[in-house]
């Protein structure tokens, strides 16, 4: 197996049982990202309140505020804007929430080693569930 790093692309080549393969991964953004920030954002977007999000995440309020600032720096957007009724997502924040609804549970399954079985695919309930609740309630 041969691994070459070429700027933004890692190229892995080799063979397994006589079958050649090449995998190209664009890893620059992923390598620099703190994926824990995405979980914090998901909870913040659900709670719309830093203190409640911090309580759910078992973090301090200042830690969640710092995480929100890091997210804003990463995405070059406010993501959540404070209003009189709590934080509201910006258009980019809404897109991120939408992406995380499917991405976080998939990452959780990937990291837990659970294989996908379409016959066992969880059915959508009538009431939408928050992202983190779906992840914690999903069968492992």
Image (cartoon, helix red, strand yellow):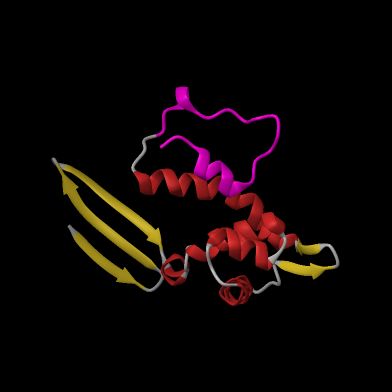
Whether 121 is among the magenta residues is yes
Q: Foreground residue, 52 or 14? A: 52
Q: Quadrant of residue 123?
A: top right
Please give left or right for residue 18 compared with residue 83 in the image: left
Whether 87 is among the magenta residues is no
- Who's the residue at 65% across and 54% down the image? 97
Q: Quadrant of residue 25?
A: bottom left
Please give left or right for residue 22 compared with residue 93 in the image: left
Q: Considering the image in quadrants, where does the N terminus appear?
A: bottom left
- Who's the residue at 21% across and 46% down the image? 20
Residue 61 placement (x, y as % from top left)? 61, 73
Residue 18 placement (x, y as % from top left)? 14, 41
Is 104 located above or below residue 116 in the figure? below
- Who's the residue at 59% across and 71% down the image? 64
Is 76 located above or below residue 21 in the figure? below
Magenta region, residue range: 116-140
Residue 114 placement (x, y as % from top left)? 36, 38
Please give left or right for residue 118 compared with residue 77 in the image: left
């Amino acid at each position: 197996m041969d691994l070459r790093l070429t700027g933004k692309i890692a190229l892995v080549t080799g063979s397994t049982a006589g079958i050649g393969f090449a995998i190209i991964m664009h890893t620059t953004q992923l390598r620099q990202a703190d994926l824990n920030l995405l979980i914090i954002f998901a909870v913040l977007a659900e709670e719309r309140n830093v203190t409640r999000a911090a309580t759910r995440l078992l973090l301090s309020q200042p830690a969640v505020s710092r995480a929100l600032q890091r997210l804003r720096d990463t995405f070059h957007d406010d993501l959540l804007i404070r209003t009189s009724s709590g934080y509201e997502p910006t258009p980019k924040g809404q897109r991120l929430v939408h992406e995380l609804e499917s991405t976080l549970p998939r990452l959780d399954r990937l990291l837990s080693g659970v294989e996908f079985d379409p016959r066992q695919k969880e059915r959508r309930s009538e009431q939408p569930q928050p992202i983190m609740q779906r992840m914690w309630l999903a069968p492992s």
